[in-house]
Amino acid sequence: MSTKTFIGYDLGDGESITDYVTMDSGEEFDIRWSDMPMLGMEEGRAVPTTYGYTGDGRLVFFNTIIRKPSTIKRVCVNFKRRPTDLISGLTESSAKYVSLQKIAEEALKKGRWPQEPEFNSRAMLNFRDSVVTFTNSIFENQIYKEKVSSEVKRGGSSEIVFCAGHPTRWNDLDVKIYELIMSQSVLGKGSYAGVRTSLTMSSESRAAYLFIKTPGTSGSKNSEENYLAVGDCALLIDVGSSTIDVTAVTADSNDSVDNYGNNYLGVRCIDFLIRDLYVAKLKEHGDAYSRFVDVVRNNPEYANAIVMACREAKEKLFRNRGIDDYASEDIRGIDSEEIFMSEVENLINTSDVTSVLKSDFHIPEEVIASMKGKSWRTLFKEFLQELKTRLNNKNINVGRIIITGGASWMPVVKETVKSVFSENSDDVILDMDPSRSISKGLALVGPYREKSEMFRKDVTEMLDTKLPEIINKNIPKLAEAISPVISNIIQGIVMKRIREWRAGSITTINGMKAKIESDCSEQNMKQRLESNQAYKEATIKWASDSLGQDIASELNELCTRYKVTGFTLGDLNVFSEIKNLKFDVGMPDIPGLDVLFTIAGLVIGVITAIMLPTIIVVVIQIVAAISTLLASLLVHALLLIPGAGWSILLVVGGIALIYAAIKGAQGAKEMLMEYLSDCDLPLWVRDMMTDEKMHSELKKSNMPEKIRKGLTSDNAARKKISEDISISLRGQVEKKTQEIQYAIESR
């Protein structure tokens, strides 16, 4: 596999940044972060997500807007939107949703923008054009491009993979439209910096957590600090400008156990509240406000441009809070106005956020109504309380809370989290590099996915080829385990019907044979096997001790190959949890135990259903042999009895046939046996077949061995059994491989 460079692109509503990592030949990769230049910002610093135009049409960004806000036209700020909010009357269950999903997918394949009206509203086109303009400005910036080209050449990369982030709570259509928009930019052109490119998407909170969990990346003193106790979850709270995303993930394996969030509760509203406060301060000075009104009259976009100055002042205030609780900063607008920490905190704690959200953002009316009259702090606290209730209802145990995202450094965020999750207050930590955790995580998504794809290929090989081989190899052990049980079941049926024949309720041996065959029909035998305690225990013991162990050994080889640690053979045994279930008592009222009984029942049912036709064939052969044996024993016994025994035989077969049988003629004996099998014999004749004699003869027949050989000797049937069991157990094994895959992707 050739070397690839992976660039993570975090286009945030408030600020944006990129990071990259290079992967060599699909093996281990060194994490070498490069401080990429971002549109005039200091290298390694995020650039505010905004742009505008000078009077002569030149594209400019944050620093220029801050320096000369009154001269900037068409300022585009906080332009990131949830795509489906721009399509009216849309629900995820509607046919329209499904139709638009297909349209977006087809447009991505063809590399064109769809013609349908939903994709061409003014709001949607403005969103598309803003994302494309800003994205192209970053990646086509000469300094940035030269830096990437240099890194690509140095690492010998033959491909660049761009991974763009999206809010976790966006639905599939949101993500698909966003990917379609990204594909319209330089990221979707197929080549960049002299090499081919591809574009992929990933949820932002998952990427941030991936970065934080990777040993050595998040600034912790040792990699063990990134891990949690088994059963605990790390709660990642990603506080952004437009959204809040929450992901609960276990540190030992498994998967993200819960995703939650709010698509509208980011902190961008605070910047706009500060802007309104700034304007209110100007009103207190008549001349200053007049100048402001004149500028806005000539340049309506100035009101948006000034938001950048408000954000800058807010960030300086909070970053200096530890130095001076009474800090103040100047908002650099048409006239500078001093703003104090107490004023900003008052806005956060008391101001109705809908005063700016309703007018400045495309937010559904029902969402605005639910927020009306509430401050950002109140809404954030309510969100966290709802989150806590949700986690409790799902029995999710929080071991650590990590706050990340561009707004996570605001003291109110950590204070509110600690107040709601008071029991975890000592475990609330701030990400060491919140402004870059998402972009770095997005850069890591690519390498881990590469390793994951390699792993999936190995898993497919295992499931398609090795799993049937493992099952085939273990069929003799299965036959060994269940043949005595099946033999006992059949013997019980046979003895019951022989006793009925001896008692006269069944008139002939053939009638008895028919009854036994009916008892051993596929439907009856299935019911008998699945309700038999010994059979269930033997099947589950085979599944856990033989098949499960061999599958675990194969999975352990995959773990070794991909350097995944922490799994024991017991952990990898897909049947280990059901090994000790007791089927002869009622199911205890223990949470989760019903699932184990369901799995056990599925395993037993699958094996029974698949092996039953083979078992029935063996049973029919055994029943026929038993009937023949019984008739043969009767002939032999009657031949040895003078008088009465002969008289019975004379009635049945005639004198010539009897003499021939006495002399050992095999054909004559078989005819006598056939006649006897269809005769209503006297009870004293039937009484000759005592329980002791029948038990002895059944033991001599070595029924368990016949069943065992029947299950193992037919190679075609054995192959079919292996393939069918493999298909049925594939889901269980797949589930276990997903745990390993998660470990690969998150460590």
Image: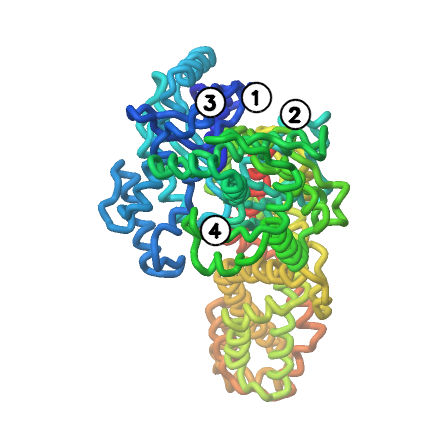
Give the residue drawn at x 72%, y 67%. 589
Can residue 549 be spotted in the picture?
no
Mark 3 or mark 4, earlier in chain: 3
Q: Mark 1 points at which residue?
A: 31
Alpha carbon of mark 4 to alpha carbon of mark 2: how far?
Answer: 41 Å
In this rendering, the label closer to the viewer, 4 or 1: 1
On the image, numbered disc 3 is attached to which residue?
A: 38
Q: Is disc 1 in contact with disc 2, using a CB cutoff of under 8 Å?
A: yes
Q: In which quarter of the image is residue 647?
A: bottom right
Amino acid type, mark 4: Ile
- The x, y position of residue 250, in whole percent, is 65, 43
Q: Name the residue under label 4.
A: 727
Q: Which of marks 4 and 2 is nearer the N terminus?
A: 2
Give the mark toward the camera: 2 or 3.
3
Kind of residue indicated by mark 3: Met
Which is nearer the N-term, disc 1 or disc 3? 1
Q: Which mark is residue 216?
A: 2
Q: Nearer the viewer, residue 295 or 525?
A: 295
- Looking at the rendered structure, the secondary structure element under dot 4 is helix
